[in-house]
Amino acid sequence: MTRPLRIAQVAPVATSVPPPRSGSIELLTAQLTDGLVARGHEVTLFAAGDSTTRATLHATFARGYRDDETLWAWELCELMNTAAALERAGQFDVIHCQSEYYPLSLAFGRLVTTPVLHTVHYAPADDEVAIWRRYPEAPFVAVSREQARRLDGLRVVGTVHHGVDTDALPFQATPGDYLLFLGRFTAGKGVLEAIEVARRAGLPLHLAAEANDYYREVVAPFVDGTSVVYAGEVNGAAKAALLGGARALLYPVQKPEPFGLVLAEALACGTPVAALNMGAVGEIVDHDVTGGVFPTLDALAAGLPRVLALDRQVIRTTTVARFGLARMVAAYEAIYHTILGAGGGPR
């Protein structure tokens, strides 16, 4: 580290940081923020008021708009939270904006002299990126090489894979006798395909996510409590136990995603992943080492026995080295110094 920096970390304001339930973006923002504080930086977190952080907290809203029904215009909430950081731009060396959807902060980067760094946590469409190219000087950090490819024509200053708290995801050498699907209930996540793979394998499948209309209308008819078990929405220690107890995590995703945090979380527990080769899956899962990456659902089903036979200790050791939080924090720290210049920029 060249010198301590004054960093504004702008989180989404949908819910608290970290989130009370599921919410990978809020969790990652919390871990990055606390990690930067631990490394000696002066960090201000712009987030919902019920957030818990080692940084200085600035709250435009007492609660997130998912938790407060009176905050009906979510885009305006996000805009005001971002504006709060930009209004104080002179107090920071760098402003890092984490966007669940499109980067609202992009249009304001030219209004301040402090560098504004953007991270988006989804796979943008080509027409979205075409609009973002109106600001070719704006620095972006990609969360995977797959996402960096989608950000074609933008100033991508680095690629940083997400990190996971491997201490909170303990290794489990001997799993239970079930497969696991953990993710939002949508067609794009491939939950029906996971049910099909488990049926072919003759193994029970546990489903873990918040129940929504898609679950109630499409998935629930398959849940019988034996071959398909609904475990509800899990977080914290319960989530770690469910991941570690699975023989494998099934990830037959139907739409490309920029990362897939649950993959790294499962691998940290020593649980192998059987996934379709889409989006950033191949960057996270090492085929025949930490899991299997397959071109089709038939290939995934046929290759599942090989995935189940992989060495769980090797999976754990490999994942700790590749996806630990310290690596992620250090990578972002280096990028901050890079965009400020070799000397770190003027204080």
Image: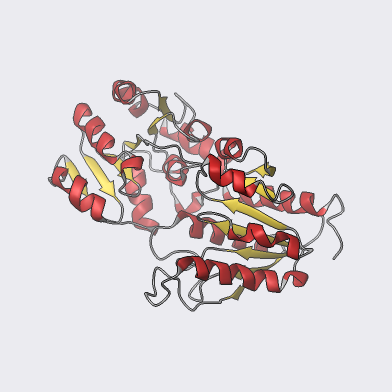
Q: Nearer the viewer, residue 245 or 302?
A: 302
The image quarter containing residue 58 is: bottom right
Q: Is residue 308 above or below residue 110?
A: above
Regarding residue 55, the answer to whether it shows in the image is: no
Is 281 on the left or on the right of 239, as rendered? right
On screen, residue 205 versus residue 251, left or right, reads left
In the picture, which quadrant includes the N terminus? bottom right
Q: Residue at x 50, y 54 (%)?
A: 101
Structure colour scheme: secondary structure
**Residue sitting at x 64%, y 54%:** 118
Which residue shows up at 83% across the image and 56% down it?
344
310 vs 211: above or below: above
- Residue 16 to residue 275: above or below: below
- Left or right of 134 in this view: 282: left
Q: Position of residue 347 (x, y in %)?
A: 85, 66
Choose between 112 and 54: the one closer to the eye. Answer: 112
- The number of discs equals 0
Q: Does the image show residue 102?
A: yes
Q: Nearer the viewer, residue 70 or 230?
A: 70
Residue 291 pos. (x, y %): 42, 30
247 or 5: nearer the viewer: 5
The residue at 67%/43% (across/down) is: 154
**Position of residue 318 measured from the top left corner of the image (x, y, whole percent):** 53, 35
Q: Give the percent coordinates (x, y) of residue 52.
A: 52, 71
